[in-house]
Image (cartoon, rainbow, N blue to C red):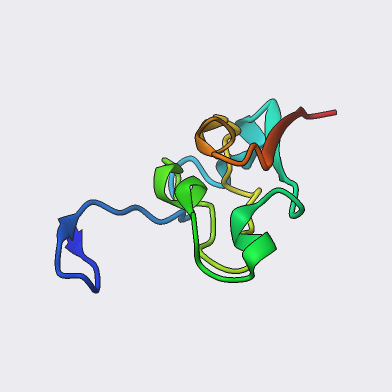
Amino acid sequence: MGTRDCQHICGESSPAIGEAGKTGEWRDSFPVIDPEKCVVARQNKPACFLCWLYCPDAVVTKTIPIQINMEYCKGCGICAEICPADAITMVREQ
């Protein structure tokens, strides 16, 4: 457990090399962000960030534009499911 700037107690994880290594090799699908649909990218200001908030592996950046660290993304698809603008699509690995 840690604290953020707002002083609320919360749990937060960060991707890191551990016993499992770079876990992106586990996935069979990966997320692709459409900047034309993404609320953050379209407005060019912090607005939504639900993908960042709900990512269980903390691999989505809270930046403009949003980026996903594919070395650690396991392809769970939570970001695509939670996106209110349908800006994230899961694509099968080749």
Query: Residue, x 55% and y 39% (percent of image)?
Result: 83
Question: In this view, which residue lies farthest toward the front?
Answer: 43
Q: Is residue 34 left or right of residue 1?
A: right
The residue lying furthest to the right in this view is 94
Depth check: 83 or 57 in front? Answer: 83
Q: Position of residue 12 (x, y in %)?
A: 30, 54
Residue appearing at x 56%, y 71% in the figure: 45
Using residue 40 as the reference point, say whether residue 91 is left or right of it: right
Quarter of the image with the C terminus is top right
Q: Residue furthest bottom?
A: 5
- Could you say where residue 60 lies in the image, as x and y percent from the top left? 54, 53
Q: Nearer the viewer, residue 35 or 24?
A: 35
* Residue 22 placement (x, y as % from top left): 58, 46
Answer with left or right where residue 17 lies relative to residue 72.
left
- Tally of numbered discs: 0
| Quarter of the figure with residue 92 | top right
Q: Quadrant of the N terminus?
A: bottom left
Residue at 70% of width from left, 29% of height from top? 29
- Residue 2: x, y in percent? 19, 61
Residue 21 visible to the viewer:
yes
What residue is drawn where x is 77% and y is 53%?
A: 36
> Could one spot residue 1 in this view of the protein?
no
